[in-house]
Image (tube, grey):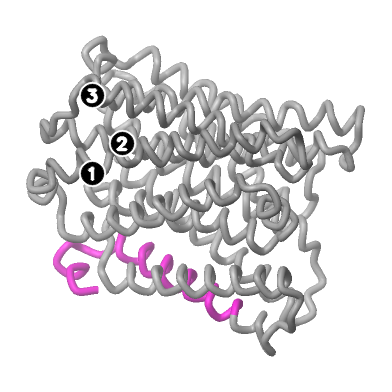
Amino acid sequence: MNLKIHIKIALAYFFIVALLGVFMRMFHVVDIEFNYKNILHAHSHIALLGWIYTAITTLIYQLFLSDKQIDTSYKRLFWSTQISILGMLFTFPFTGYALLSIFFSTYFLLNTYVFVRLFLKHTSQEQKKTNSYKIIRAALWFMVLSSIGPWALGIIMNTLGSTSPWYRNAIYFYLHFQYNGWFLVALIGILFGVFERYSIPFPKKVFQLFIKLFISGVILTFFLSILWMKPNFSFYILAGIGSIFQITAFGILGKQLKIHKEQLKVSLSKMEGILLKTAGLLFIAKLFFQLIGSIPGISEMISNNLDIVIAYIHWIFLGIVTISLFAFLNHFKLFKISKRVYLIYLIAFILTESLLFYKGMVIWLNVALVENYYLFLCIASSLFLIAISGLVLLQFQNKKKSIDY
C-alpha cells in the first residue's frame, strides 16, 4: 500500500483549505454573492478532518500498523473516510449545516471510531509496552472524547437552541479535545516513536511524570474554554493549574531533548531539525498564552475578541501542528519539502498571524484600523496558497529535480 498517495490526498485537501481561506479574505475586499458562514464551515472541517486527520492517521499507520496483515481493511476504511470528507466538502459550501452535511459529518465520526478499534486491536503486545503507543492511545481516546461535542450539538439545538451557552460550550469542547487532546498529543506520540526508532532512551519515572502532567494539563485547560461565561473563580484556578502542568511537562521533555541533542542531530535531517525547533518554539509560546488566558479580566477580553481567538487557533493548526507534520512526513519519507517552499509558508504564517493579532489589539484598544487592512490580509493569505502549491508540485517531481526547488 502506497501511503504517499494518502499524503498527496491530504495535501490536496490542504490546498483546498488555503483556496477557501483566500476566498474568505476576499469577502472584505470585493463584493461576493456567497454565504460566508457556509464557506467557513467547509474551510474548518476540511482543515481539521481532511488535512490534519488524514496526515496524522497515516503517520500512525506507518508507525504501528504497516507491518500487519490489514492492508485491505485499512484501504476500505481510508476510502470510506475520504467519502465522508468529500461529502462535507461538497455540501457545506452550499448548504451549511443541513441534512446532507450533518450526515457526512456523522459518517466521518463513525469512521474515526473504526480507526481507533483497528489501532487497539492490531498493535502487537510488544508495541503496547512502548511510550509512543501509550501516548498515541491517549490521543485517540481524546479524539473519541471530543466527539461528544458534535453529538451534543444536535440535542442542544432541538432543546435549548443555538443561542444557549451550552451550544457554544459544545463547540469549544470539541475543538479543545481535538487540537489540545487529539492533534498535539498524537504528534508528541509520533515524536516518541522517532525516539524509539533510534533507541533514544527516556527514563521510565521521568516518562510517567511527563505523561501524567501533560494529560492532566489537557483535561484541566479545557476550563479555559468556558471562562467566557465568567464562572466561579475556582475554574480560573483549575485552568491555571492545567497550564502550569503542561509547561512543567514540556520542560521535562525539553530537558531530555537537550540530553540527547547529539543523537537527535544524527537521527534527523537539518531540515527536520529546523521544522521541529520552529514547532517547539511556537508550542512554548502557546503554553504561555494558555497561562495568561487563565487570568480573570484577560480571559474575558480574549474570549470576546474573535480576531485573537482566530489568531490563536491558526497559531496551533497552521503553526505547531502543520509544521510538525511537515517534519514527521519528511522524516518517514512520505512527502518532500524544500527550504524555499517552507520559507514562503513561514512568511505567510508570520504575516497573517501578525495581522490577525494586530486587528485584535485594535479592537481591544478601540483605535482605527490601518487603511487597506483586509487587502493586506488577503495578499498575506495568498502566500499560503503559493507555498502549498509548491508542496503539491514537489510530490510529483523526482528526487534529483526537487533538491533545489
Kind of residue at disc 3: Asp
Distance from the alpha carbon under mark 3 to that under mark 1 = 15 Å
Q: Which mark is residue 190?
A: 2
Distance from the alpha carbon under mark 2 to that under mark 1 = 11 Å
| Label 3 sits on residue | 67
Q: Which mark is residue 290?
A: none
Please tell me how crowded label 1 is: few (under 14), some (14-19), or many (20+) other residues with Cα within 10 Å.
few
Residue occupying the point 43% across, 24% down: 138
Of the pair 202 and 385, the residue shown nearer to us: 202
Q: Secondary structure at mark 1?
A: loop
Please tell me how crowded label 2 is: few (under 14), some (14-19), or many (20+) other residues with Cα within 10 Å.
many
In the current view of this chain or complex, which residue is farthest to the bottom? 371
Distance from the alpha carbon under mark 3 to that under mark 2 = 17 Å
Instruction: State which tag comes first along the sequence, 3 or 2.
Output: 3
Percent from the top left, x then y, of residue 345? 40, 69
Residue 385 on the magenta span: yes
| Label 1 sits on residue | 332
Q: Which is more foreground, mark 3 or mark 2? A: 2
Quarter of the image for the N terminus: give it. top left
Quarter of the image for the C terminus: give it. bottom left
Q: Which is more foreground, mark 3 or mark 1? A: 1
Q: Main secondary structure of the magenta part?
A: helix
Classify 130 as above or below 189: above
Q: Which residues are magenta?
A: 377-405
Of the pair 98 and 366, the residue shown nearer to us: 366
Percent from the top left, x then y, of residue 357? 59, 68
Viewed as shown, does residue 33 lie left or right of 309? right
Residue 143 on the magenta span: no
Kind of residue at disc 1: Phe
Q: Secondary structure at mark 3?
A: loop
Viewed as shown, does residue 265 lie left or right of 186? left
Figure quadrant of residue 186:
top left
